[in-house]
Amino acid sequence: MASSLPERTRRIKASAQVHDRYTSAAVGSWLRNDVGSKLRRLMELGWGERLLLAEAAGALVLASVAIRMLPFRRVVRAAGSGSPAEATAADAGAADIRRVKWAVEASARYLPLKLVCFQKGLAVHKLLQRRGVATSLHYGVAQDPDQGLAAHVWVTHRGQPIIGGEEASRFTCLATFPAAAPS
């Protein structure tokens, strides 16, 4: 038995609506929105900035894996390796610090991992150390009325905070890596 004309018309319109979801116009609208704007911003960056973002993302992933898989003392030993005296000689300064901080924070926003101060601090510390910038990674604790004992990591360069410094005043520093040389 043949369908009525209104029934066939309704099915054709429904089919067209489903098809429209997958047309280039629909895909274009999706790309113009959230994902598209992020990709566009990435493509507007120079190759040096893209490589730095990739390096920061890799450092964040490695820091996250190290924190989850290795004993704390091994993570601390890795953070403390590389002497500040060697790094200070090749200190490139404020431009490297700004670029590395930007790359770590930008990468952390888009990685599908829970990244907190510890991972970000390790990543910034190691990336700057690799560039010859002497930094110190600080590990502190504070008594939190809601959560009990809270921990925080922040990174400094010549006593000035680079990352995590906004909250550092609440915490008592338990350790600094690399350890300060005894006077």
Image: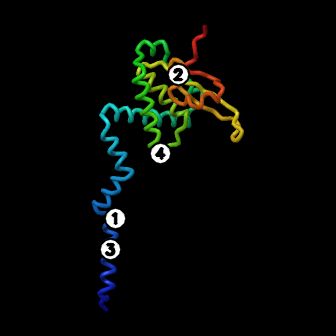
Q: Residue furthest bottom?
A: 1
* Residue at the disc numbered 3: 15
Judge whether 151 appears above or below 158 on screen. Answer: below
Check contact, mark 1 vs mark 3: CB within 8 A: no
Report x, y in % for residue 17.
Answer: 33, 70
Label 2, label 4: how many angstroms apart (C-alpha)?
A: 30 Å
Q: Nearer the viewer, residue 11 or 81?
A: 11
State which tag comes first along the sequence, 4 or 3: 3
| Residue type at numbered disc 3 | Ser
State which tag comes first along the sequence, 1 or 2: 1
* Residue at the disc numbered 1: 21
Mark carried by residue 113 = none
- SS at badge 1: loop
| Residue type at numbered disc 4 | Pro
* Residue at the disc numbered 2: 160
Report x, y in % for residue 73.
Answer: 60, 26
Q: Which residue is depicted at the point 32% across and 45% down?
A: 40
Check contact, mark 2 vs mark 4: CB within 8 A: no
Q: What crowding class fits label 1: few (fewer than 14 Cα within 10 Å), some (14-19), or many (20 or more)?
A: few
State which tag comes first along the sequence, 3 or 2: 3
Report x, y in % for residue 153.
Answer: 57, 30
* Residue at the disc numbered 4: 112
- SS at badge 3: helix
